[in-house]
Image (cartoon, grey):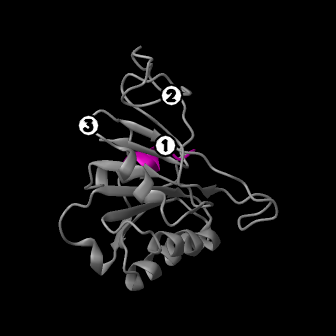
Amino acid sequence: MQTATPIETAQSAAWQGAAPAVAVVVSSHSRGTLLDGLLDVLESQDHNDFEVIVADNGSADDTWSVLTSRCARTPLRLRALRLPFHDGPAVPRNTCIVEARAGLVAFTDDDCLPTPAWLSSITGAFDDETVVWQGRTVPESGGWAGPSRPALPTSGRWLSPTSPPNATSCGPGSSDSRPAPAFRAAPGAAACVRR
């Protein structure tokens, strides 16, 4: 797993303490204007045992100053990582995963607005066998981030180790007991994995 060494880090006062149940990971590149919206809705989650780790992927705008300002005033367990630019979100996300303290890692994007029950739905879907939960994003025409506003609903598919991708019946009790193939590419804006 390729990671990067942060140039700078910042964290909120709430960051300290015991490891939470779930870590929310976000990679952002030059989207400082969107981050406050995302962090506002994360502050409104009905789940109260989570941390947020945001990687600034070599942004050319005010992304880093937005993140450090937010760290100074948010009630979230927030950690910000300033990274050199990497082509795509993989290295920044991997770096966030290494920094995460939680056993579950949820992914969302800087242009998404998760619904208030998003994290509760994710953690509620996990049992002893579940390793991946995959939700969906729903664009709103003319919405928040431009022509489409992805919003993370509170329902979606989740996969257990024996469930095939895109199964209509997933999880424990599924009639399909074939081993799940490796995921080469899965949408990252509404996913959660067990570490």
- Quadrant containing the N terminus is top left
Residue that numbered label 1 is attached to: 90
Which amino acid type is shown beneath numbered disc 1? Ala
Which quarter of the figure has residue 148?
bottom right
Residue at 60% across, 71% down: 32
Q: Residues within 10 Å of mark 3 (few under 14, many from 20)?
A: few
The residue sitting at the bottom extreme is 73
Question: Which one is in front in this view, the residue at disc 1 or the one at disc 2?
Answer: 2
**Tag 1–tag 2 contact (CB < 8 Å):** no
Q: Residues within 10 Å of mark 2 (few under 14, many from 20)?
A: some
Q: Which residues are magenta?
A: 87-94
Question: Which one is in front in this view, the residue at disc 3 or the one at disc 2?
Answer: 2
Residue at 27% across, 54% down: 102
Residue 128, labelled with which disc?
3
- Quadrant containing the C terminus is top left
Residue at 61% across, 65% down: 60
Between 167 and 26, the one lying in front of the other is 167
Which amino acid type is shown beneath numbered disc 3? Asp
Q: Is 104 on the left-hand or right-hand side of 89?
A: left
Q: Earlier in the sequence, mark 1 or mark 3?
A: 1
Between 47 and 11, the one lying in front of the other is 47
Residue at 76% across, 65% down: 143
Separation of residues labelled 3 and 2 (CA atoms): 18 Å
Residue that numbered label 2 is attached to: 169
Residue 162 within the magenta-colored segment of the rendering = no
Q: Evaluate whether residue 45 shows in this view.
A: yes
Residue 90 x %, y %:
49, 43
Which amino acid type is shown beneath numbered disc 2? Ser
39 w.r.t. 149: above or below:
below
Q: Secondary structure at mark 2?
A: loop
Q: Earlier in the sequence, mark 1 or mark 2?
A: 1
Between 126 and 141, the one lying in front of the other is 126
